Amino acid sequence: MTEKQMLETKSDQSNNPQSIRNRTRFNLLKPLLVAEIYFIFTLILYTFGPTTWINTNPYFLYTFLLLYQLFFSFGYLYEINKARIPIGLDSKKENLITSNSIKIKRFIKFIIIFGIIMTSISTITYTNISIFSLSALIDQTINGITNPLSAYKESFGGGSEGGIIFLIIVLTSPITWAAFPLSVVYFKRLNISYKVLVIIMFSLEAMRWIIMGRNKGVFDLAIIIISIILIRKMQNKHENINNEVFKKRETKGKKNILLILILLTLCISYFTNAIGDRTNNHSYYSVNMDAPLMKISPEFFHPTLIYLTSYLTQGYYAFSRIIEIQWTPMFGIGNSMFLMSNFSDLFNNDMFQYTYQSKLALKGINPMSAWHSYYTWIANDVHWIGVLIIMFLLGRFFAFVVKKCVVEKEIIAYPLLCLMFILIFYFPGNNQVFSQPVTFMAFWVLSLYWLMIKKRIVFTRSVWGMADK
């Protein structure tokens, strides 16, 4: 066999359907890899970082943290392996929502305008700016940067929650929240005026959280942008899985890497400044300046490393103590402060008193200032053993959303993907997505709406199939 024939045979083998499906599945594993690298990073911080935790249960902690991630990975891999991976023209089929590019463009423009209006209202409501003044906004933003502790304390006493405006913000949150990831996805297709509106919308949202002296919103925006960059890169890989053109396009990835590095640098710099004033008020840990990570890191990075370790790993410590607490089943409402608050008002009974968080206060862990990890919140409902099942199902859903984004490009999957990445980022800290009313509503409304659409599509196809017969 000649060298040319050998190359042709190898090319034919690489282009057969099974080979293409295998490469596609491998491409779909990237988000799982990102999630597990992040988990390992937080575990390294907890184990070798400068924070010394007191009275932990290490065997219980490490065993179940590893088991949770294994079950999460198993769920993800199971969904990817069972999923039907279309090839050829089938891989470019669009959902009925995304079938008309003109309608999509109009929808994106609408959602951007709606998003910037509601973001402006949220900024005024949460920051207590009586009149929307650019100078006042800038002044308060500067104050949030220079006096983060003062801004943080003031954000709790402003009465931002409650009332008709807050209700409108929550009820419209699925549309408002979706505006952020979708505007990033379609940013290049927008004209200059809408691109400016997107930048203003992101700037207002970032300023709102800075004025409140909080890190969450700034991190969320960075996660949204980084998530979309990752998924777009995966889409390019999928579309060119069998095309040499992709190799030439890979050089453009350097710009994305640079953007990600800039975002991470800005976020970490803001985080170091904002968290520095309010991280040393816990009595259940101390700082070890001789920790391994402190010895190998440059001195200028030590404050950031101390704050980062405390911020990202204190939830692990709280989780390690739940084995000492008796479990009270909460039947689905114990994972969310949003749900517990509403059920407490409905039944005139404090639901929070039954949680691990409330009971751990007797161990010296203040539920109002310390984080308890996603696993602890879910354990309120299903026990810490039941969390294994939840992690498996969560891994499956994550993989399902990733596939819908990469392979089928379903427009509604993008906001859910970003919500999943935010949920994963806060695994060590809390149940961030489901505890906040805005993200709670966004996740469940978008998910249920998506399910209704999928059922309608299946029903329509079955009807047309019967008609054809």
Image: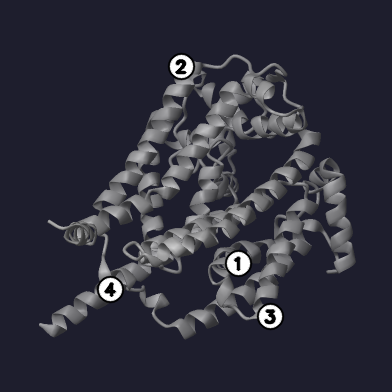
At which x and y percent is residue 445? Answer: 48, 62
Task: Give the foreground label among 4 and 3.
Answer: 4
Q: Callout 3: few (<14), some (14-19), or many (20+) C-alpha neighbours within 10 Å?
A: few
Mark seen at residue 176: 1
At label 4, the amino acid type is: Leu
Whole-number angstrom distance, CA of label 2 to CA of label 4: 51 Å
User: Residue 86's quadrant in the figure?
Assistant: bottom left
Mark nearer the N terminus (1 vs 4) = 4
Q: Nearer the viewer, residue 262 or 92?
A: 262
Mark nearer the N terminus (1 vs 2) = 2
At label 3, the amino acid type is: Ser
Mark nearer the N terminus (1 vs 3) = 1
Q: Where 329 falls versus 127 (above or below)? A: above
Secondary structure under tag 2 reads helix
Q: Is residue 434 toward the left or the right of residue 367 in the image?
A: left
Name the residue at 50% across, 35% down: 39
Q: Nearer the viewer, residue 20 or 10?
A: 10
Secondary structure under tag 4 reads helix
Mark seen at residue 89: 4
Whole-number angstrom distance, CA of label 1 to CA of label 3: 19 Å
Which quadrant holds the C terminus?
bottom left
**On the image, numbered disc 3 is attached to which residue?**
193
Name the residue at 34% across, 66% down: 243
At label 1, the amino acid type is: Thr
- Residue 235 visible (yes or no): no
**On the image, numbered disc 2 is attached to which residue?**
59
